Image (cartoon, helix red, strand yellow):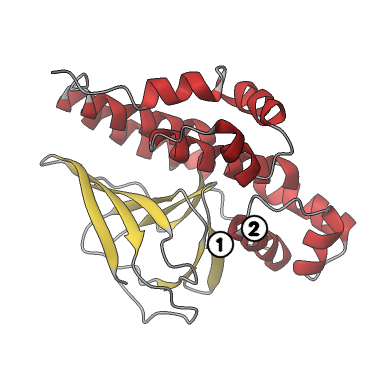
């Protein structure tokens, strides 16, 4: 896969990169194997991964762990899809998908800003990134749940355009499943509602736009599917404890002179 890569941090133990997919491919790739263990953290749109007999969606609410000797295939239909990549020298179990909470996206954004401001020491960052990987891939988070196809279709549909104001019936139709069955299955498999999943994706998008210095919060709210700036601000504060304007200040403060 042709990625544009930006190295955020490198040490003998690990490497942190930002990735942007250069071109889309709606067909399954050949089988790949990684040379070193790595954790892929999507933060826009989604892609599919197949490991063994299991195919599943990878979106900003999921982390993908890959290790050498375990072939995988990808289907990436969205050019420009962006992810973060941690290449770590660690044994954290078999290749798999794991839940990626919104708090992890915020922590990575804060560390990125800390590097820009030269207020994060390399040792502290190494320990923090490794601890994050260990937390995401902890044994209790590694339950082998066979992906339910309707749930995966719903994840793909929502993650493709989280700003759409889809109804439960529309999502269920896209997933080729009854609304009642989908709502129950989705909560069972992901631990959250369809609405909670979509909101988490919107908040991830908001964090990235604010990190890039988005100045027009009303435009951001509309782009994320909110009918008003005030509604967006209330949802944002509920998830992060501060408003989007304050978060933008925190994430784009200039480096020291």
Is the residue marked by circle 1 packed among few (<14), some (14-19), or many (20+) residues within 10 Å? many
Point out the tag, 2 or 1, that comes first from the N-terminus: 1
Q: Secondary structure at mark 1?
A: strand
- Residue at figure coordinates x 44%, y 78% from the top left: 25
Q: Report the quarter where the C terminus lies.
A: top left
Residue 79 appears in the figure: yes
Residue appearing at x 30%, y 28% in the figure? 113
| Number of numbered labels in the structure image | 2
Q: Secondary structure at mark 2?
A: helix
Residue 146 is at least partly visible in this image: no
**Where does residue 183 sit, x and y in percent of width and height?**
81, 51
Would you identify the image quadrant in which residue 106 lies?
top left
**Badge 2 local density, few (<14 within 10 Å), some, or many (20+)?**
many
Locate residue 120 relative to residue 39 in the image: left or right: left
Which x, y percent locates residue 248? 44, 26
The one of 173 and 95 positioned closer to us in this rendering: 173
The one nearer the camera, 143 or 221, is 221
Residue drawn at (55%, 17%), measured in percent from left and top? Answer: 242
Dot 1 corresponds to which residue? 57
Q: Nearer the viewer, residue 27 or 252?
A: 252
In the image: residue 28, left or right of residue 240: left
Query: Disc number at residue 155?
Result: 2
Residue at (68, 45) in percent of width and height: 225
Name the quadrant containing residue 135: top left
Could you tell whether 172 is left or right of 214 in the image?
right
**Image location (x, y in percent) of residue 112:** 29, 32
Q: Residue furthest left?
A: 12
The answer to whether residue 214 is left or right of residue 9 is: right
Q: Say which mark, if any, is on residue 175.
A: none
């Amino acid at each position: 896969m042709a990625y544009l890569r930006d190295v955020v941090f490198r040490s003998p133990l690990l490497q942190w990169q930002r990735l942007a997919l250069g071109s889309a491919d709606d067909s399954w790739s050949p089988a790949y194997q990684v040379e070193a263990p790595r954790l892929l953290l999507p933060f826009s749109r989604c892609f599919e991964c197949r490991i063994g007999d299991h195919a599943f969606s990878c979106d900003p609410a999921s982390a993908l762990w890959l290790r050498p000797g375990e072939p995988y295939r990808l289907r990436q239909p969205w050019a420009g899809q962006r992810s973060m990549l941690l290449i770590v020298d660690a044994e954290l179990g078999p290749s798999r998908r794991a839940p990626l909470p919104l708090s992890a996206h915020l922590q990575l954004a804060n560390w990125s800003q800390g590097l820009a401001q030269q207020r994060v020491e390399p040792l502290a960052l190494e320990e923090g990134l490794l601890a994050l990987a260990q937390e995401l891939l902890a044994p209790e988070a590694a339950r082998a749940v066979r992906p339910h196809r309707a749930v995966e279709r719903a994840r793909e549909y929502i993650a493709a355009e989280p700003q759409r104001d889809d109804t439960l019936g529309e999502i269920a139709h896209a997933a080729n499943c009854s609304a009642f069955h989908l709502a129950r299955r989705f909560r069972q498999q992901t631990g959250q509602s369809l609405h909670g999943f979509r909101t988490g994706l919107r908040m991830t998008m908001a964090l990235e736009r604010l990190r890039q210095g988005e100045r027009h919060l009303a435009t951001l709210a509309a782009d994320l599917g909110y009918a008003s700036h005030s509604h967006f601000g209330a949802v944002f504060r509920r998830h992060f404890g501060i408003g989007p304007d304050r978060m933008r200040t925190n994430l784009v403060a200039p480096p020291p002179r």
